[in-house]
Amino acid sequence: MTPRPSPDVLARLRYEAASKSLVLAYLIWFFLGYGGVHRMYLGRWISGLIMLAIFGLSLLLTIIFVGYLGLGFIILWWVIDALLIPGMAQRANDRLIDRLSR
């Protein structure tokens, strides 16, 4: 009969399986960041969906040359997020620890 792992070991395994990777967050940011996918990955669904909506609407409005303002805003937000990703990942992992410790 195999020994059952302690609750601490199980919590650690659950944390490692569900924690957010900083490298993956930056890869998502680089390739899909204009659509806010990196924010969704880090648990910030509302701001990610807002970013996606602004990007989509701005892309549609480029036909009448109004959407370029929105795209400029998204690019600025995308660059600022490059500096914010480590903190967002840490907070997502802290929330995971809180959830697992209950």
Image (cartoon, grey):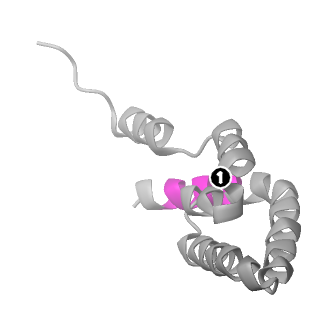
Circle 1 sits in a helix, a strand or a loop, which is it?
helix
* Residue labelled with disc 1: 32
Residue 97 visible to the viewer? yes
Q: Residue at x 79, y 80 (%)?
A: 70
Amino acid type of the residue tagged 1 in the rendering: Leu
**Residue 101 visible to the viewer:** no
In depth, the one of 36 and 41 nearer the eye is 36
Residue occupying the point 56% across, 62% down:
40
Whether 92 is drawn above or below 69: the answer is above
Q: Which residues are magenta?
A: 89-98
Quadrant in which residue 50 is drawn: bottom right
Check if residue 97 falls in the magenta segment.
yes
Residue 2 against residue 83 in the figure, above or below: above
Q: Position of residue 73 (x, y in %)?
A: 84, 77
Q: Does residue 73 show up magenta in the picture?
A: no
Task: Tell me if residue 23 comes above or below residue 53 in the rendering.
Answer: above
The single residue placed furthest to the top in the displayed view is 1
Q: Give the position of the C terminus as an image quadrant.
A: bottom left
Among the 4 quarters of the image, the one containing residue 61: bottom right
Q: Main secondary structure of the magenta part?
A: helix
Residue drawn 54% across and 71% down?
45
Q: Position of residue 92 (x, y in %)?
A: 60, 58
